Every structure is written in C-alpha cells, then in structure tokens.
Amino acid sequence: MKKITLLLLLPFTLIAQEDLLKDVDSVSNSKNKVESAFKALKIVNLESTKLAAKGDLYFIVAHRFGSLKEGFEGAYGLDNAVTQLKFVYGLNDWFTISAARSELAYDFSGKFLLKSQEENGFPVAIAAFSSIGFNNTLKESNYPKMEFKNRLIYVSQVLISRKFNSKLSLEVAPTFFHENFVVDDNQDNSQYAIGMGGRYKFAKRWSVNIDYAAHLNRSSTSSFKNPLSLGVDLETGGHVFQMHFSSSQGIHEAGFLGNTTGDWTTGDIFFGFNLLRVF
C-alpha cells in the first residue's frame, strides 16, 4: 500500500520541483520580493544590485585585453592585458564584502542592500556600494615625493534597479569618487558621475548587458572619456560567464569612471570577460 501511495504522489512531487525551479529567476519567497534583477554582481563594469547570499564565497577573475586598435603588432590586445582577481563574501543577506587586486589597483569594498523590490509593492531595489582603493600605477621613480596617502581612492554609489519583467532589468547609479592624485592638474579630486545599465534576457541562460557612465565634472582639458560597455552573460550552474567589449580597460570604479581612454568611434575598444564561481 505504501508503494502505491508513493507512486501516486510522484507526479505531483515532480511538478512541484519544476515550479520551484521556474521561480528561481522570477518573483519568489514569502516576503514577496522580486529576485534576480541581475544574475551577476556586476552588469559589465558597473556594480549591480545583486549581493552574495549569506555564507556564499565568490571567486571572480576579471580580464581585459589590450585595445583592438593595436592591430597585428599588439596581437589585437593579447600582449597588453589587465587581470583582476577578486574574492566576494556574503556576511549576511544584506551585506557583502570584497577584496581585489589588479595591475591597476588594490580594492576593498562593501555592498549593502537597503531595500528590495516587491511585487505590487516597493517599485525598485536600492543598494549602497562603497570602496577604498590604492592606485597601483603610481611609481616612486616617477613621483619621488609621493606619499602613501596619494594612492588612496574613495568610491560611494547608490544603486537603484528595477526588474520590469522576466527579461528586462534596468539600473541607475549616482556616484561620488575621490582620487587623492589626478593626472590632469585641472581636474577636481572629488568627482561625480551617473552610471546607467541594463540586462535583457533573450534565452534561458543568455542575456545581453550594457552599461554607461556620464562624468559630471570632468576637466575641459582632460583626455579621458565616458565608458561604454556591451556584452553577454552566460549562466552555467555555479558559474556566470560575462563576455564584453568596453571602451575602458580599467576594472576598479575610478579606473573606468574617471580614466577611460578608449573610444568606440575609432575602434579603440577592449575585449574582456568576468568569470564568477560561487562556493
């Protein structure tokens, strides 16, 4: 009799499991929160409102090749790559910490969930991001009077996103960052930007992502430009693989917000990827 009962219940169990899997990428949980506005911790360069879950440890490899404009002599960017290694840990469901290092900067940051988007309730998700970085490009041989404090970089962002449906999510990110050392003497150390980005899911495991940042008080003599990045995300179980083209080779916030050198109109762009593994 027990065996017959189990056989009768089996179809309903399988249906329930399928329903749970469908809910992973949409609206779920008893508090009616909207989940998965973004699958990755970053849209491309710009931080997303996604945080690591409590106890989750992410290992992230972010790689940016050199400019495609280098042509054959520079192996179309292969000879001048920049790599960032990053660890991200979820202390709890509303606070994530991270530490990263690249050829350009050391970076320590925190991301805080202030408010979740709710179905038929609060219309957006809001998170705060803050980091302190150490500029690794300043060489004492070039700046003999440089002190350690000159390397410091501070970044603060408010991340505001909305998931409109199962396919489309958008985000805006008012940003303040302060560089103790700037290349252009006419550039204010304290700088402001507005980041914008979005994700459109066009297949079960694929999405196209884009982000852009407008610098609001850039010096008129500056040679730097606003960063524009475009790419795709591929979800593969415990991995999210992001492939993209960007006008910025910098990965740290101040690197792409304030010091982007590339230009899409001239083909001066950088191919790169972010590979995320969660444990």
Image (cartoon, helix red, strand yellow):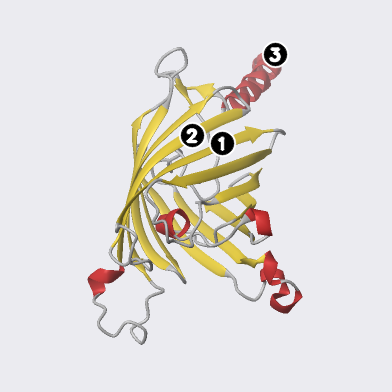
How far is the residue under mark 2 from the one under mark 1? 6 Å
The residue lying toward the viewer, choosing from 96 and 220, is 220
Which one is earlier in the sequence, the residue at label 3 or at label 1?
3
* Residue 107 visible in the displayed image: yes
Q: Residue 171 carries which label?
A: 2
What residue appears at the point 33 percent right and 53 percent down from the top-left corner?
Answer: 131
Mark 2 in CB contact with mark 1 (< 8 angstroms): yes
Q: Is 106 located above or below residue 109 in the figure?
A: below
Q: Position of residue 244 (x, y in %)?
A: 64, 52
Query: In the rendered view, does 23 fall on the left or right side of 128?
Result: right
Q: Which amino acid does label 2 sit on?
A: Glu
Please state which of residues 67 and 231 is positioned toward the viewer in this rendering: 67
> Which residue bears the numbered disc 3?
8
Q: Left or right: where does residue 163 sit relative to residue 222?
A: right
Instruction: Name which residue type carries label 1.
Output: Gly
Q: Return the mark for residue 198.
A: 1
Residue 36 showing in the rendered view? no
SS of the residue at dot 3?
helix
Q: Which amino acid does label 3 sit on?
A: Leu
User: Going 34% across and 66% down the picture, which residue do you hit?
Assistant: 182
Asked if 42 appears above or below 187 in the picture, the reply is above
- The location of residue 68, given as percent across then percent down, is 69, 65
Which of the marked residues, 2 or 1, is nearer the chain's N terminus? 2
Toward the viewer: 258 or 204? 258
Dot 3 crowding, Cα within 10 Å, few <14, some 14–19, many 20+: few
The residue mark sitting in front, 3 or 2, is 2
